[in-house]
Amino acid sequence: MWALVLRNNKIKRIDRGAFRDLNLKWLWLNNNELEKVESGWFKGMNQAQHQVVLDLSNNKITEVEKDAFVELLPSAGKGMREQRKYAGLQAVILKGNPDIAFPAELLKKLEQDNSVRVILPQEARARSLGATKTPLSGRKNRLKQLKKSITPLNFQQPTEPLSE
């Protein structure tokens, strides 16, 4: 089986190991009612040599466990020889889950260490990376104009104290 399409259902819960012994390229779980991505869901899945794309978009996901996708990484329980021929996880699509909390260490493990594409809502990615919002509206704001050249912003330490 190359694809398993479970989208547009009312799935709220998935048992650990539910996809055991399935060799998939695509797993569509989008447009359901999932609230949490748990570790163990993918245990025993994709022992073959192809990559997999997981679509978990447009659910109600607010939490992703820190080990949620490790079973699909090339190094998950495999020796060096097996790692070379095992493609692993290619992408995880989580857009449409605006309140999702995605662990920063998992984001790094997936994207930087394993070249997995993680598609998150923009604010969720910012939260995962520790960014905070800086409101530029309100009475204390003294902005008069924004020019097109503000990207990229170049902040430098002043050499002299700023005067008001």
Image (cartoon, rainbow, N blue to C red):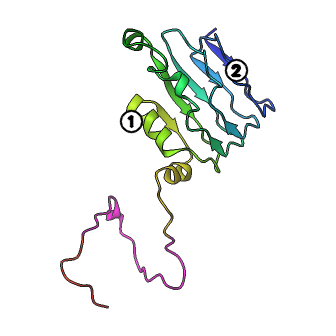
Neighbourhood count class around disc 1 (C-alpha, 10 Å): few under 14, some 14–19, many 20 upward: few
Mark 1 and mark 2: span between their CA atoms? 29 Å
**What is the three-letter code of the residue carrying label 1?**
Gln
Q: Assign a secondary structure to mark 2.
A: strand
Q: Quadrant of residue 4?
A: top right
Part of the protein shown in magenta: 135-156
| 160 sits to left or right of 92 | left
**What is the three-letter code of the residue carrying label 2?**
Val
Quick one: label 1 or label 2, which is nearer the N terminus? 2
Q: Nearer the viewer, residue 36 or 122?
A: 36
Residue projecting furthest to the bottom? 164
Does residue 96 appear in this view? no
Q: Quadrant of residue 160?
A: bottom left
Classify the position of the N terminus by image quarter: top right
The residue that label 2 is drawn on is: 5
Q: Is residue 3 above or below residue 159?
A: above
| 59 sits to left or right of 134 | right
Please state the horizontal and vertical placement of residue 31, each as a whole percent of the image: 72, 35
Please state the horizontal and vertical placement of residue 164, each as a whole percent of the image: 32, 91
Residue projecting furthest to the right? 10
Residue at 53% x, 22% y: name it.
Answer: 72
Q: What secondary structure characterizes most of the magenta part?
A: loop
Neighbourhood count class around disc 2 (C-alpha, 10 Å): few under 14, some 14–19, many 20 upward: few
Q: Residue 142: say if magenta.
A: yes
Q: Is residue 110 above or below residue 160?
A: above
Q: Nearer the viewer, residue 158 or 103?
A: 103
Label 1 or label 2, whichever lies nearer to me, is: 1
Please state the horizontal and vertical placement of residue 127, each as a whole percent of the image: 52, 54
Residue at 50% x, 36% y: name it.
Answer: 118
The residue that label 1 is drawn on is: 112
Q: Residue 70: say if magenta.
A: no
